[in-house]
Image (spheres, rainbow, N blue to C red):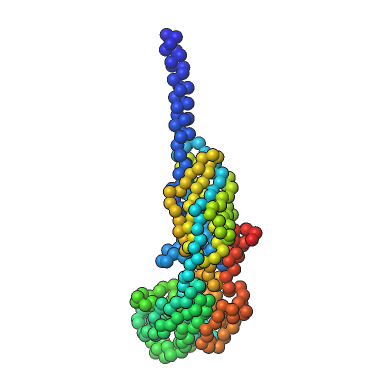
Amino acid sequence: MKQNFLTDSISPILSHVFNNRFDNAKKIVISSNDILNINNKNGMKESVVVEPKLYSNFVFNNLTIENKRQAQQAITEIELYDIEKQDYAISDVQYDGGFFEEKQKIVLLAYNNGNTKDFIDVCSLNYYTYESGAYRKHFVKKQEINYEEIEPGNVKSLIIESLESFYDFFEDNREYSDLKIVVQNREGEEIEFLSVLVRYDREQQRFVNHPRGFAGPSVEEVPLFNLTTDVKKQSVKCSQMVSYGATNIGFTILVDRTCRLKYKIKIKSGKKEIKDKNSYTLLIRVPAYTQEHGGFFGDFYNFLLAYNQELKSFDYTKDLIYALKSELVFDKYKAAREFGKITI
């Protein structure tokens, strides 16, 4: 009877100790890492989906941490190791322009945001008229674009075309209301983000732009890896509790130049080290201009409104752009200072 009493008393204690040890042995694992570009103009975190995937020099890493224990655990440090920065030559031809109401002209321009020259990869502007209400489109004409090179940092006009030749069509065919102009690449694909839709205003007997607008959020404050010097590894302190299940931990990386960046990740929880099973390779492109991605009605559209009001053909260098409007030229530390609240 006494023996049974002792056994019955000790069994729950042993079970509790065993369960604690079993739970304590459960691991923290890094299950994924979502790497996002940080737009230097508005601080917006952006997925990079277009091949080749190019990141600017300030990027956001969003780790997903799986805690398999019931109890909370603390992440105390993040480390990057096996870091490599290999210099890299890359072209990055982007496009801008839009419709200028005062001159009634459509402008398509190219700018090279890379560090080596390359050829223009668009071949034509396609013009369509649209019926009112039904919104059916009708192909009107194709305007060819010369196949030519553009130097790194240069901003060059490709097409400057008056739309006045369409006035008679819209006056004679009142069921039509809009004209769409869209860029086509050399694979025959139309590029929707390089398109302009203008409305024909019959009272004014001219084309007018449709309204447009943009907005974006800022990146939150997270640990920073400052890789503006060449190092093989770097660690930053962290104090984030991870509960049972999945938790996200973010950090940013700042790089000083265009390069192929390689790194591995591990995190620490007290004395325990947890390595990410993956390694990462990013193409980092320090662009020539703050406008990293092209699109109509961008920075260079506004630049032409101020500095080329007659819309004459042009081929500007980066030095000239800087002399006229320096804020268009990329400041590689601006995003880190402004949106990461980092002193550098």
Query: As displayed, is residue 279 above or below residue 175?
Result: above
Query: As displayed, is residue 14 above or below residue 165?
Result: above
Between 298 and 256, the residue placed more toward the observer is 256
The spot of residue 112 in percent (x, y) is 49, 75
The spot of residue 4 in percent (x, y) is 42, 12
Between 127 and 344, the residue placed more toward the observer is 344
Q: How many marks?
A: 0
Q: Residue at x 50, y 43 (%)?
A: 273
Q: Does the image show residue 250?
A: no
Q: Residue at x 46, y 87 (%)?
A: 161
On screen, residue 193 versus residue 336, left or right, reads: left
Query: As displayed, is residue 118 above or below residue 165?
Result: above
Query: As displayed, is residue 259 above or below residue 83?
Result: below
- Outermost residue, top side: 1
The spot of residue 24 in percent (x, y) is 48, 34
Query: Which corner quadrant of the image does residue 303 belong to?
Result: bottom right
Between 190 and 262, the residue placed more toward the observer is 262
Q: Quadrant of the C terminus?
A: bottom right
On screen, residue 37 versus residue 129, left or right, reads: right
Q: Residue at x 40, y 89 (%)?
A: 169
The spot of residue 182 in percent (x, y) is 41, 78
Q: Quadrant of the N terminus?
A: top left
Query: Which corner quadrant of the image does residue 342 belong to?
Result: bottom right
Q: Does the image show residue 164?
A: yes
